[in-house]
Image (spheres, grey):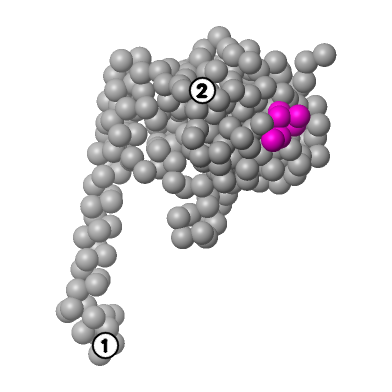
């Protein structure tokens, strides 16, 4: 009998991160899941780590791939669960009952996403809460890929696109939303996300790829997205200008003499 959930981890030259992720998955109190690990041919000891814990992994492979989405697609091809949960190396499931909570949610939902605990570069944590999925939300944000419960059948029918470097998970969510698939946003933290991933470090590439995707696939929303980006950039420039003014020598002098309220 196939498991209810397939957990997929992809990794490349991140042995320490892989071990952290592995621990968060294998210590879950829910047991009706399979664990799939796709390693990109790491040379840092990751393969040896997988060999050590092979009895706790349903399927694993260590071989070169064509990038993140190729690795994810390899994992999807092996998945046998009704639903799939992705948790990449370096990230982790937030608590030991995450899979238990995801497993009991109404199976009619195609995508179930949770909030995320961001692990910042300085080591501090910051919880990022999401609103329910909508067109406005998708044009300015994305359901968090890590820790989401996604219907496996939909993933197999619609593999991640290989023509983008960092937005194919967002593009997948966007296409399914336009197809009227059922989304649910939980008021629960489902994952810890280390904020050093490829998309978080390349915001301009992210914007460029999203705009290209919309131009080619959903032109009716492309102009709206362009305007939202323009407004976001203008707002950022205004904030920077205000910050510069308030840090100026003149303002500091006025503050010293308590004259800023005049």
Furthest residue to the left?
250
Furthest residue to the bottom?
257
Q: Does residue 205 show up?
A: yes
Q: State how many labels appear.
A: 2
Give SS at disc 2: loop
Query: How far is disc 1 from disc 2 in space, using C-alphas?
Result: 63 Å
Stretch of the chain drawn in magenta: 52-57
Please state the horizontal and vertical placement of residue 80, each as a whole percent of the image. 70, 15
Please state the horizontal and vertical placement of residue 136, each as a whole percent of the image. 43, 32
- Name the residue that disc number 1 marks: 256
User: Horizontally, is 27 left or right of 129 in the view?
Assistant: right
Please state the horizontal and vertical placement of residue 176, each as a whole percent of the image. 51, 18
- Residues marked 1 and 2 touching at CB (< 8 Å): no
**Which residue is at the front of the view, 239 or 123?**
123
Please state the horizontal and vertical placement of residue 141, each as a whole percent of the image. 44, 37
Give SS at disc 1: helix
Q: Is residue 54 magenta?
A: yes
The structure residue drawn at horizontal position 45% and vertical position 55%, both measured from the top left corner, is 121
Category of crowding for the residue at label 2, using alpha-carbon neighbours closer than 10 angstroms: few (below 14), some (14–19), many (at least 20): few
**Which residue is at the front of the view, 106 or 59?**
59
The structure residue drawn at horizontal position 80% and vertical position 35%, both measured from the top left corner, is 30
- Name the residue that disc number 2 marks: 63
User: Horizontally, is 31 left or right of 225 in the view?
Assistant: right
The structure residue drawn at horizontal position 65% and vertical position 17%, both measured from the top left corner, is 79
Q: Earlier in the sequence, mark 1 or mark 2?
A: 2
Q: Which quarter of the rendered picture does the N terminus lie within?
A: top right
User: Horizontally, is 102 left or right of 144 in the view?
Assistant: right
Of circles 1 and 2, which is in front?
A: 2
Q: Does residue 168 show up?
A: no
Q: Is residue 84 above or below residue 101?
A: above
Q: Main secondary structure of the magenta part?
A: helix
């Amino acid at each position: 009998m196939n498991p209810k959930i397939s957990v997929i981890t992809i990794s490349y030259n991140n042995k320490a991160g892989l071990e952290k992720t592995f621990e968060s998955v294998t210590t879950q109190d829910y047991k009706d899941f399979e664990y799939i690990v796709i390693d990109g041919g790491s040379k840092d000891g990751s393969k040896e780590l997988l060999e050590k814990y092979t009895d706790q992994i349903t399927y694993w492979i260590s071989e070169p791939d064509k990038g993140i989405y190729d690795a994810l697609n390899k994992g999807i091809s092996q998945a046998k669960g009704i639903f799939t949960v992705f948790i990449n190396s370096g990230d982790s499931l937030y608590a030991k009952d995450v899979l238990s909570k995801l497993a009991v949610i109404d199976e009619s939902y195609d995508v179930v996403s949770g909030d995320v605990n961001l692990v910042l570069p300085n080591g501090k944590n910051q919880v990022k809460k999401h609103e329910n999925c909508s067109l406005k939300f998708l044009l300015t944000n994305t359901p968090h890929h890590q820790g989401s419960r996604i219907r496996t059948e939909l993933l197999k029918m619609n593999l991640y696109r290989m023509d983008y470097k960092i937005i194919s998970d967002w593009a997948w969510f966007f296409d399914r939303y336009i197809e009227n698939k059922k989304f649910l946003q939980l008021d629960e933290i489902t994952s810890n996300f280390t904020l050093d991933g490829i998309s978080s470090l390349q915001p301009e590439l992210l914007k460029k790829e999203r705009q290209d995707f919309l131009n080619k696939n959903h032109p009716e929303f492309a102009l709206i997205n362009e305007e939202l980006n323009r407004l976001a950039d203008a707002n950022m420039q205004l904030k920077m200008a205000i910050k510069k003014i308030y840090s100026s020598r003149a303002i500091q002098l006025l503050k010293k003499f308590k004259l800023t309220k005049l």
